[in-house]
Image: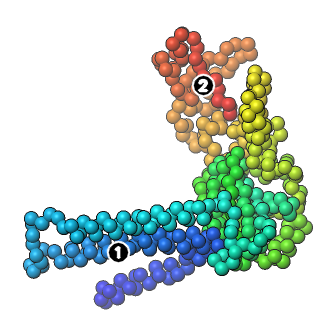
């Protein structure tokens, strides 16, 4: 069998596999994603104006000046050509200027914080239209969506009417994450104690994939959800369904939901406790914790003075999962203070059971283990003295 036929037969299964690929980035259903797709294509086309000729001429020169071609002109003393220099430098310079202009314009027009000015390339945004507000919270490992105007919330399911602007407010109750619906718009990061924004619109009815685009632990790969693009009647029916089938979302039920879990099913909440999203954003959903906006107000007023030491317990956030016994399986030993899940202990760490017992009324014996294995600046472990000879042992971490 000829080699060419055999090669074709080997490649046929690969073409069959590729035919099942869903290139959603190149076939978006929202205006913002469409404009981002166009930006990718325009940038790629501009770069190919340089790449293709360079590759073509490289192959041409290699063929023309091969060793076996005795007819090619051989000039070992050639060293300069003004025409070639102008061509080599001017063409890339023009491309770079074009890419720079394209990038500058798109950076401003596609700013996720910028409200929409159109529904698509042919329809401007109608005057007086009210966007649909959705408050997004990234949890371990699921997505929580608040609809403040409708008074409902959902887990791992999102819906919006077609051709209606959507205003997303995005935060995280845990580690940094990334909110991404490829058919709708680009990814936007979700960070604890911060609120990012995204303005977008869906132009075609359908069911689209939403996902986490930033690694966030063991449940990251299953942190997906469905985004439903519906007509207005369909969206109203969906809201009615959530209200009919859902349960109230109180602060306590939110704290139960916030605990790390994987493969979380879709959940509906018919009502939401007032101020819950604001409490999540300001990191004070747990009773007794100080809200960040309260903290910023104290700082703006010049601080709380000597009385601020009483706020320490209200500012300890990081270790509460470990204290509640619901620490995520992938939590690190250093951050939790608990024994490793692996039989191999990290360097510098020992199981807690080996720590010396401190009797009431006696001073604890400081060791390298007490401070993460770090030694003092002045000498070996245990000799933690400053330049004046006084003890300079650092206090325990706040999250312990």
Report whether residue 223 is seen. Answer: no
Q: Is residue 125 visible?
A: yes
Residue 341 appears in which quarter of the rendering?
top right
Q: Quadrant of the C terminus?
A: top right
Mark 2 lies on a secondary structure that is helix
Q: Position of residue 386 (x, y in %)?
A: 53, 15
Image height of 60 relative to 167, above or below: below
Instruction: Report which quarter residue 240 is drawn in.
Output: bottom right
- Tag nearer the camera, 1 or 2: 1
Q: What residue does disc 2 label?
A: 370
Looking at the picture, tell me which residue is in the foreground, 83 or 397. 83
Q: Quadrant of the N terminus?
A: bottom left
Q: Residue 52: which disc?
A: 1
Q: In the image shown, does 46 or 355 lie closer to the viewer?
A: 46
Residue drawn at 73 percent across, 13 percent down: 361
Residue at the (10%, 80%) spot, across then down: 71
Q: Residue at 73% across / 29% down in the picture?
A: 302
The secondary element bearing badge 1 is classed as: helix
**Image x and y of residue 388, in percent:** 53, 10
3D distance between C-alphas at marks 1 and 2: 62 Å
Given contact means CB atoms under 8 Å apart, are the residues at marks 1 and 2 in contact?
A: no
Mark sitting earlier along the chain (1/2): 1
**Left or right of 258 in this view: 122:** left
Label 2 environment density (alpha carbons within 10 Å; few <14, some 14–19, many ≥20): some
Answer with left or right where residue 240 lies relative to residue 315.
right
Q: How is the image coloured?
A: rainbow
Residue 29 vertical placement versus 156 (above, below): below
Vertical arrangement, residue 395 with respect to residue 320, above or below = above
């Amino acid at each position: 069998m000829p080699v060419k036929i055999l090669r074709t037969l080997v490649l046929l299964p690969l073409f069959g596999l590729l035919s099942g690929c869903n290139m959603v980035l190149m076939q978006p259903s929202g205006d913002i994603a469409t404009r981002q797709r166009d930006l990718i294509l325009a940038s790629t086309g501009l770069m190919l104006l340089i790449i293709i000729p360079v590759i073509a001429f490289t192959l041409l020169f290699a063929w023309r000046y091969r060793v076996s071609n005795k007819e090619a002109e051989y000039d070992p003393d050639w060293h300069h050509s003004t025409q070639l220099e102008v061509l080599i430098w001017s063409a890339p310079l023009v491309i770079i200027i074009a890419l720079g202009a394209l990038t500058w314009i798109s950076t401003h027009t596609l700013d996720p914080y910028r409200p929409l000015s159109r529904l698509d390339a042919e329809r401007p945004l109608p005057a007086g239209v009210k966007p649909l507000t959705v408050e997004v919270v990234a949890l371990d490992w699921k997505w929580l969506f608040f609809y403040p105007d409708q008074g409902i919330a959902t887990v791992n399911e999102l819906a919006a009417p077609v051709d209606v602007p959507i205003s997303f407010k995005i935060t995280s109750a845990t580690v940094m994450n990334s909110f991404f619906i490829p058919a709708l718009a680009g990814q936007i990061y979700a960070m604890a104690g911060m609120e990012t924004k995204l303005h977008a619109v869906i132009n075609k009815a359908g069911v689209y994939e939403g996902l986490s685009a930033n690694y966030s632990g063991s449940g990251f790969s299953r942190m997906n959800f469905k985004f439903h693009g519906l007509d207005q009647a369909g969206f109203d029916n969906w809201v009615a369904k959530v209200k009919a089938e859902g349960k109230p979302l109180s602060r306590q039920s939110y704290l139960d939901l916030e605990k790390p879990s994987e493969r979380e099913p879709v959940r509906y909440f018919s009502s939401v406790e007032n101020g819950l999203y604001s409490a999540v954003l300001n990191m004070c959903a747990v009773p007794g914790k100080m809200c960040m906006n309260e903290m910023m107000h104290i700082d703006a007023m010049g601080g709380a003075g000597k009385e601020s030491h009483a706020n320490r317990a209200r500012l300890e956030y990081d270790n509460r999962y470990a204290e509640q016994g619901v620490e995520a399986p992938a939590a690190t030993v250093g951050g939790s203070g608990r024994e490793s899940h692996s039989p191999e202990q990290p360097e510098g760490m020992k199981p807690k059971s080996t720590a010396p017992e401190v009797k009431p009324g006696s001073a604890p014996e400081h060791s390298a283990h007490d401070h993460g294995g770090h030694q003092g600046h002045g000498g070996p472990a245990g000799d933690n003295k400053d330049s004046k000879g006084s003890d300079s042992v650092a206090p325990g971490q706040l999250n312990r």
